[in-house]
Amino acid sequence: MTSELLALPTSADEWMEFVTTRPDAFLAKAREHVAALKDGTPRTAVETLNLWNEVTWSLKSAGSPSYVLSECHPDPAVRDAGSERYLAAVAFETELMLDRDLFELFTNTLATDEASDLTAEESRLLEHTLRDLRLAGVGLDDAGRARAQELADRDSQLSVEFNKNIRDGKRSMRIAPDALAGLPQDFIDNHPVDDDGLITLTTDYPDYVPVREYATNRDTRVAISKLYNDLAWPANDPILAELLDVRRERAQLLGFGDWSDVETATRMAGSSANVDAFLTRVDDASRDAAATEYGTVLARLQQEVPHATDVTTADLAYLLNTIRREQYDVDAQVVRSYFTFTAVMQGVLDLTGALLGLEYHPVSVPTWHDDVHVFDVAKAGATIGRIYLDMHPRDGKFNHAACFDLVVGRDGVELPEGVLMCNFARGTMEHDEVTTFLHEFGHLVHAILAGHQRFTAQSGIATEWDFVEAPSQMLEEWAWDADVLARFARNTQGEAIPAALVERMREADAFGRALLVRRQLGFARVSYQLHHDVPADITAAAAHWVDTTSPVKNLEGSHFACSFGHLTGYGASYYTYQWSLVIARDLLTAFGDDLMNETVATRYRESVLEPGGTKDAADLVRDFLGREYTFDAYRDWLSGR
């Protein structure tokens, strides 16, 4: 394996050249390789697949860095150029998926006698390539393929614009200092009063998260929640409406019932009907417990707001924190005093290093911003990849938390490199944010460990989309282990977080779990039903599905669908979070009572993470558990056991 890694620009004025010239060169290479594939030269099946691999690798090399920079570079011109190059790569990929000559080439390759001699990975690549060509619409007539290309390109354009409006949609409000009653002192100290005697809050996570969790003033919670829900409204209203129409037409053109049928054709769920049935199963499993929990949180709200008839999304986090403090002796402000960003970051590195047999070496290399931390990842003394941690909010940057490929690794050619983008405060963190850190870092190590396959299409996180969250959701459990947290969770006096407090945190976390699952179920229903029904009034439909699924009500007049970023990349498939969680809870059973069991962790790394997309997800899970996964562990978790 080569030890060379991607060299980023060393000065600000080189970034525009990097984000334009490099992708253009790789796109040109991809076109050259396609021309070679179609030039009529006799090739063996393996030679054909190797040349196709050059195409897909060139496309990833053109698109991945472009997309990353479109989401995080401080220069808006570079972000816009990144978006343009990313869209160009996606458009060419769509064009290839509609190429009848390529389809005939791969079909003939499959029909040759030597196809039976292909390795498992080679056969998988060939079969999946043919499947993807069919799903793209390669079997349509000329007019149909032209329309499929037009619709796919428009889908990509709308998705990029939708995400850009969320990224750039930061809102702010000015309030009197007494409206911050209940907020931690360090938060108040970081928000000085201006010349008008007011304090400014924004929709960035370091403001939004603490306010919704600690502000005793309900009006303050409601005000910032409305701002956050509407941060991309009204700009995204017409974009989302067109996006849903485009996807409906794509599904119909391809002969599918709805867009969910298109997406699940390559996923574990298998069909839109199976998604609907799964959501109904989660509904049945969580309904009664959620109703009981809701009665408790409503009663607690009425102690402060006697006339309240509903718990809203602006209330839930605050009420859960309050009840956990009063009934379980878990004060979230005390808990957060043990988590400072620098210690948490080092703790996550140390934990995953010990668990998965990895080492992280800080390196000083050029990046797009001074905030970015860079580490080379090593296993058994050899460098296997590089990670970039871009962890704090700034204008123009992706404003949620996610992992992105900078470089998709390829065995013997290029090491995998991943980027983690989060929006944490620079000082003290909420425990929920620690859990989020672990979740997203789970994606990052998955991408690095799996990024060493021969074929680009199987390298990195290349499993079915309704499995990709499972490894990250499983890793969240380590944020609830007293021995693990004692390694890095310390207060200003240097005292480790008490084991008794962690145990109370675990008990308190079980309360409200069903309500939070119902919230996630509501989002899954919105994601699914908007693509299934394609309503004329998106705002009303989204509100309906949230309010009929979860007892916690959406804020009246909210346009949260406009800032629901998962509607682009995840489409109709937000269900994947609960689907993956079912698997994650079962994977955890292998560790028993010892989350740091090195033997189990090594088997997990080798069986689930490192294979990447060389096997079906169900096979990866079976290899690790020694059986099919079940719903049992998820049901137990949901009931608090």
Image (cartoon, rainbow, N blue to C red):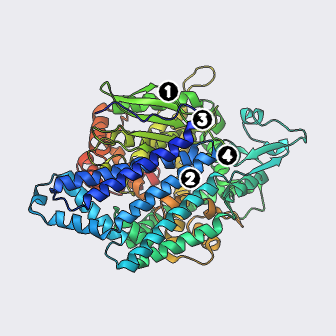
Q: CA distance from mark 2 to mark 3?
A: 48 Å
Residue 243 in view of the camera: yes
- Seen as rendered, the residue at the extreme right is 196
Q: Secondary structure at mark 1?
A: loop
Comes first in the chain, label 4 or label 2: 4
Residue at the disc numbered 2: 512
* Tag 1: amino acid: Ala
Query: What residue sits 53% from the left and 58% below the top?
Result: 566
Residue at the disc numbered 3: 12
Q: Nearer the viewer, residue 172 or 123?
A: 123
Q: CA distance from mark 1 to mark 3?
A: 41 Å
Percent across and percent down for residue 175 are 83, 47
Q: CA distance from mark 4 to mark 2?
A: 25 Å
Comes first in the chain, label 1 or label 3: 3
The disc at residue 204 is: 4
The disc at residue 572 is: none
Percent across and percent down for residue 261 are 39, 71
Q: Marks 1 and 3: which is nearer the front?
A: 3
Residue at the disc numbered 1: 486
Q: CA distance from mark 2 to mark 1?
A: 25 Å
Percent across and percent down for residue 460 are 35, 46
* Tag 4: amino acid: Asp
